[in-house]
Image: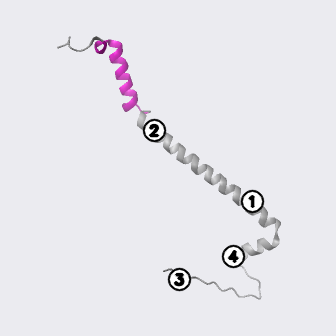
Amino acid sequence: MYRRIPRIFRNFYFITSFLFLVWMLFFDSNDFITQYQMSKTLSNLEEEKEHYLEKMDEVQQDRKELMSNAELLEKFAREKYLMKRPNEDVFIIVEKED
């Protein structure tokens, strides 16, 4: 029965290399599945980072515009924070949802 196995598969170096490969792919703490999951997580985090960097740029640009234009600042304060002048009344109209 031992003779039926091809000679290459009986080689000590082949068996050792095969076992090492199996260990590294499935049982090691840095196995293939873990590496795949970590790379997927990394790519998702990099996408989130790009999104937040773009949002930060938009906010910085809006801030510059608000601080340079008094009318725009007043409009923003009225719409966002419902601020008003002392002699004004503010009415908020909320539409019903279907």
* Mark 4: secondary structure: helix
CA gap, disc 1 and disc 4:
19 Å
- The residue under label 1 is 61
Going from N to C along the chain, the mark reached first, 2 or 4, is: 2
Above or below, comparing residue 74 to residue 85 in the picture: above
Label 3 amino acid?
Lys
Q: Vertical placement of 90 versus 19: above or below?
A: below
- The colour scheme is one colour
* Foreground tag (4 vs 3): 3
- Percent x, y of residue 4: 20, 13
Q: Which badge, 1 or 2, comes first in the chain's sequence?
A: 2
- Asked whether, in this view, residue 7 is left or right of residue 93, the answer is left
Badge 4 amino acid: Glu
The kind of residue tagged 1 is Gln
Give the distance between the C-alpha atoms of the residues marked 4 and 3, in whole angstroms. Answer: 20 Å
Q: Residues within 10 Å of mark 2 (few under 14, many from 20)?
A: few
Q: What is the number of the mark on residue 79?
A: 4
Using the rendered view, name the quadrant where residue 78 is placed. bottom right
Which picture quadrant has residue 62? bottom right
Give me the residue at 77% from left, 66% from top.
66
Measured Cα–Cα span from mark 2 to mark 4: 47 Å
Q: Compared with residue 25, is residue 38 higher up or lower down, i.e. above or below?
A: below
Kindly identify which residue carries mark 3.
96
Q: CA distance from mark 1 to mark 2?
A: 38 Å
Question: Camera-side residue: 88 or 55?
Answer: 55
SS of the residue under disc 3: loop
Residue under numbered circle 2: 36
Mark 1: few/some/many CA within 10 Å (<14, 14-19, 20+)? few
Q: Which residues are magenta?
A: 8-29
